[in-house]
Amino acid sequence: MAADQSPQAQSLNTQLSKSASPSFTWLHRGISEIFPNQPDSESPDENLEQRILKSDRPLRIKFGIDPTGTEIHLGHSLVIRKLRAFQDAGHQAILLIGDFTARIGDPTDKSEVRKQLTAEQVMQNAQTYVDQVRPILDFDTPGRLEIRYNSEWLSGIDLSKILELLATMTVGQMLAKENFADRYKKETPIYLHEFFYPLMQGYDSVALEADVELGGTDQKFNLAVGRDLQRHFGQRPQFGLVLPLLLGTDGTQKMSKSLGNYIGLQEDALTMYSKLEKTPDSLIKSYFELLTDLPLDQMPENPRDRQKLLALEITSQYHGGEAAEAAQKAALILIQGNTVSSDAVPEFSLEGIQFPVKLFYLLSAAKLCNSSSEARRQIQGGAVRLEGDRIQNVDLTFESAADLQGKVLQVGKNKFARLVQ
């Protein structure tokens, strides 16, 4: 799927899904549900395989993402990888940037109203999203990718169209959406603009004339609204293709930046590799299935070898094979307490640091910790090392950049920075 894979990955073929014919292995791998789905039907409206086979044109495959933040993680990549699989099968991917809907905020999985963003914040976030998905999607083959923004049609929508959309759904149907029902029972405010969100996302499918919409299991309601609206406006209803939510590195909760159990697509190769190399045994199989194209029946028997292969393969997807192998070597060196120079260790420039400087401030500035208070806790807990030596003096101060030049600062087992002037 991504270029410059590890040598191990290049020698392996995609695992055949037991539920799919060989020609549609790519379609069925790792999915939770396709709807509607009548596998014995020859109708292209009931069986997605039949629509693919009988269509006289490439299908239009929609995936929408609201740029409400600046960072995409591996949990988001599941759906984007499936979008790439459709591209590789000859279909047209539509990456829909929800620049308009992001200003409202998807109420899915939220216990309270989301903070609204400005148009400027949304567009800045949108550009970072496009940059981060480049290693996954095919941006080069003509006709394989459309990048669209839903402000194209939603920003100019008039009141009559809004009323028409609202008339397609009842309050009872909206309250059937799980998080709305919970909030209503708890008397947590639900604002009317939140009701409009699923309708706007559904209208995106109308505007784009989508044949298939991709989403996580938490998006099934919104995907179904898209089908209903396409039917209302006289279009052939799209198929919904639902993928599971990826568990985070803690092995228990959904991958989330707020929970700290995530692996960002923009993380440096060493950090990405180091996190993945410690993937819990309970997650190994699902990570292989959802995040790679490697055959599940050819995974190494040794659990440690499985972790290393997983880390090498995924890091290769985003940084290339050479960088992934360098990260693997550097991780081993750092685990052993050796700080021999390695290009895989990301550098942090001390140029903007005012000396003397406290260690806890330096950890925050280098983004090895999210804040100075977290840095203090990490120091007190013995998680911080400089050149392999554990440091537990919270008030440790460095007088000049020369004291730190070339040294590796480490927090826990996964975060590293080589300090340079």
Image (cartoon, helix red, strand yellow):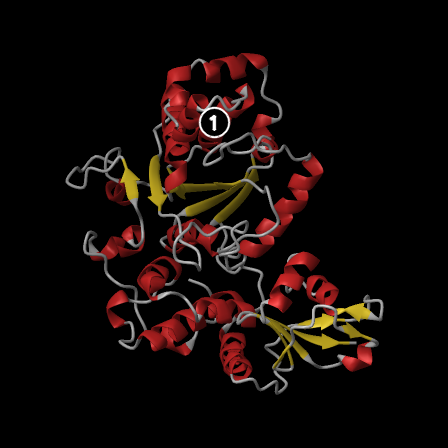
- Which x, y percent locates residue 274? 50, 71
From the viewer's perspective, is residue 2 above or below residue 71? Answer: below
At x 30% / y 51%, what residue is drawn? 27
**Residue sitting nearer the eye, 129 or 363:** 363
- Which x, y percent locates residue 387? 65, 82
- The residue under label 1 is 203
- Give the residue furthest to the left: 40
**Residue sitting nearer the eye, 131 or 140:** 131
**Residue sitting nearer the eye, 111 or 51:** 111
Describe residue 114's horizontal placement relative to residue 317 as left or right.
right
Q: Quadrant of the C terminus?
A: bottom right
Q: Residue 289 is drawn in which quadrant? A: bottom left
Q: Report the number of discs.
A: 1
At x 64% / y 65%, what residue is drawn? 368
Q: Residue 406 is drawn in which quadrant? A: bottom right
Task: Tell me the crowding category of disc 1: few under 14, some 14 to 19, or many 20 or more residues within 10 angstroms, Cα based.
Answer: many
**Label 1 amino acid?**
Tyr
- Which x, y percent locates residue 328? 49, 78
From the viewer's perspective, is residue 348 above or below residue 142? Answer: below
Describe residue 66's horizontal placement relative to residue 242 as left or right.
right
- Which x, y percent locates residue 326? 53, 80
| Residue 349 seen in render | yes
Q: Quadrant of the N terminus?
A: bottom left
Q: Residue 397 is drawn in which quadrant? A: bottom right
Q: Say what secondary structure mark 1 lies in.
A: helix
At x 47% / y 27%, what residue is drawn? 203
Describe residue 107's horizontal placement relative to residue 396 as left or right.
left
| Residue 169 seen in render | no
At x 47% / y 18%, what residue is drawn? 165
